[in-house]
Image (cartoon, coloured by chain):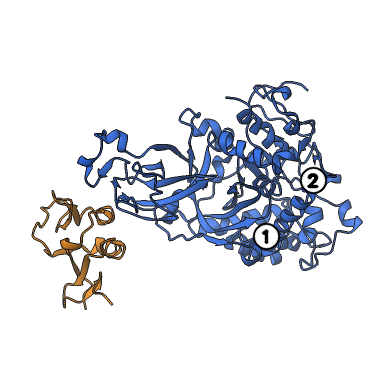
Amino acid sequence: MSVSIESQPRLTGQTPWFEGDVPAEAVPEKYRLDRAYVPKGRYLDPEFLKLELEKVFTRTWLVACREEELPGVGNYVEYEIGSHSVIVVRESRTAVSAYYNACRHRGTRLAKGRGRVGSLICPFHGWRWNLDGSIRLVLDREEFVPRTDEDLGLVRVRAETWGGFVFITMDPNAMPLLEYLDPIPRIFEPFQYQNMRIRWQKGVILPCNWKTALDGFLEAYHVAGTHPQLFRFDKSNTNIASLAELENRVWSPTTTYERHAHYSSIGQKKNTSADAGKDPTARGTNDVVDPRLSVALSVQYIADDMRGLENDRSWRAAQALKTAEVPEGMNAGEYMLQLYRELSVAEGYDWPEIPAEKWADAGTAWNVFPNTILLPNQGSSFMYRARPNGDDPDSCVFEIFSLDQVPVADYGRKRDHQPEFFEDFRDADLGEVFTQDLMNAKEVTVGMHSPSFDGHRLSEDQEMTIYNHHRVADRYLWSE
Amino acid sequence: MSDDVRVWIDQKLCTGDGLCIQYAPEVFEFGGDGLAYVKEHADGERLSEAGARADVPEALRLEVIDAADGCPGNCIHVVRREDGAEIAGPDAN
């Protein structure tokens, strides 16, 4: 395999390798990657999960929460990963801090879930800390061996923000967040994540490995098989795709960077090439002759069924498009975007112009290594996050965040936010598309346990996002 | 009836948590004893007498009500200036 320059994206069509990757022989054979191949032990072995918790999750930057979840001084969110609990708290109007969520006395967890406090008070013996982590009160302190205030202060976890997300890392020597996220902050800049707020947030337990949950959203190769209704006029028809429909399937090549990766849905495979990029005006519904209706139905189905990535404004723009006179020299998709822009600007939203090359760079969905996915779109976005559920490699906590841009006048406005949680995703009212995706979780896991299955055989064009996660994970797993 | 309110703290029940001071530092302040007291102006003297009442500026009314609602000691009383009826705090209905 050839060597590329660090941080240059590896384009489609081959298994990625970057300068600084660990050599194959450094990886135990049962976990060793091969060309477009990932052995199943990396998903199923409790021993591998233990390694991930020790070496990946403790050394990478992780999305802990959104800044709008910490509107006031003293608001906190607990972030649990593996056996660790970290408390993220707004320390002042301008500073968010994170601490290991453990009392310095006998280790008790200090705060659970989310809430607002004046000081952190241990529920066991009442020791107290200020929001800056300094010790405020130890009852009968004279009875203890003399200890400095520093020794009794809460232990900090690094916290940094980008795009309204609060990231934490337990590695005091980790590189700065923006360097870690590169090239995402550069490419995502026009999508203005800092001006988005959580519209809804749902968490579910899935009967699969945490990576299996993410893998399902890291490629669009599954669309023809899993979401046959997506391009049909009759969305209620979920019968398996006909061969004629497969002939018109979309193609979504993957691009891998040194740490992160994305796929781009760029159109029908038979009519496109790897040089094409994602184009937000190129979308539609099969067998609908009127291009206005074709585009509008596509937008409205996502808005109605997924309740994210699109929003009330793009839904209304699509409604207007159905009967609009499309100007000369414009196609229906381009006119849809213009209507959406006019509506947004009239209603007080900022509308940054996103040039074609920025859309192409942004693509459709990104793996933010290790356990987050972002889907950039103008005005709305999804974020998915998966975490192991205890020490069971076949169970995970999977969360969906639906994010919407807010009007300029509301940038400084505080909002109430309550995440929802469901033991079973079928109770979570997630719509047809998400339900189809999540139904696969159990099936993949059962099948992977079969003695006949040894590992994932991946498409080098459309599934290198999945491979890339493992390639990057190896850097953390097999190095000191 | 006017919405103007006053606020007072039952210091016997104050836990010293400081949540009220985070909501409205212009109204609440720690005393040297670690308990919370009220004051009438952001840069004014705190009213050091137990149970002293302070007028709440209109712009801070909601913050002060939130402080009373969230108070871990349940000891902040927000009363209507006109008739003394408690609108937030342990005696509000």
- Colour of chain B, in one word, is orange
On screen, residue A150 versus residue A234, left or right, reads: left
Mark 2: few, some, or many residues within 10 Å (few <14, many ≥20)?
many
Mark 1: few, some, or many residues within 10 Å (few <14, many ≥20)?
some
On screen, residue A44 versus residue B93, left or right, reads: right
Question: In the picture, residue B74 is in which quadrant?
Answer: bottom left
Q: Position of residue A115 (x, y in %)?
A: 39, 56
Q: The disc labelled 2 sits on which kind of residue? A: Trp
From where the camera sits, is residue A364 visible?
Answer: yes
Question: In the picture, residue A457 is in which quadrant?
Answer: top right
Q: The disc labelled 1 sits on which kind of residue? A: Ile
Query: In the rendered image, which residue does mark 2 sit on?
Result: A251
- Please state which of residues A166 and B40 is positioned toward the viewer in this rendering: A166
The kind of secondary structure element at disc 2 is loop
Q: Position of residue A218 (x, y in %)?
A: 70, 45
Point 51% across, 33% down: residue: A178
Return the chain for callout 2: A
- Please state which of residues A268 and A384 is positioned toward the viewer in this rendering: A384
Question: In the picture, residue A101 is in which quadrant?
Answer: top left
Name above or below for residue A30 compared with residue B14: above
Query: In the rendered image, which residue does mark 1 sit on?
Result: A302
Question: In the current view of this chain or complex, which residue is farthest to the right?
Answer: A243
Quadrant into which the N terminus of chain A falls: top right
The kind of secondary structure element at disc 1 is helix
Mark toward the start of the polypeptide (1 vs 2)? 2
Which of the chains is blue? A
- Please state which of residues A351 and A309 is positioned toward the viewer in this rendering: A309
Tell me how far mark 1 sits from mark 2, CA to CA: 19 Å
- Please state which of residues A24 and A77 is positioned toward the viewer in this rendering: A24
Name above or below for residue A21 compared with residue A290: above
Quadrant into which the C terminus of chain A falls: top right
Q: Position of residue A123 (x, y in %)?
A: 34, 54
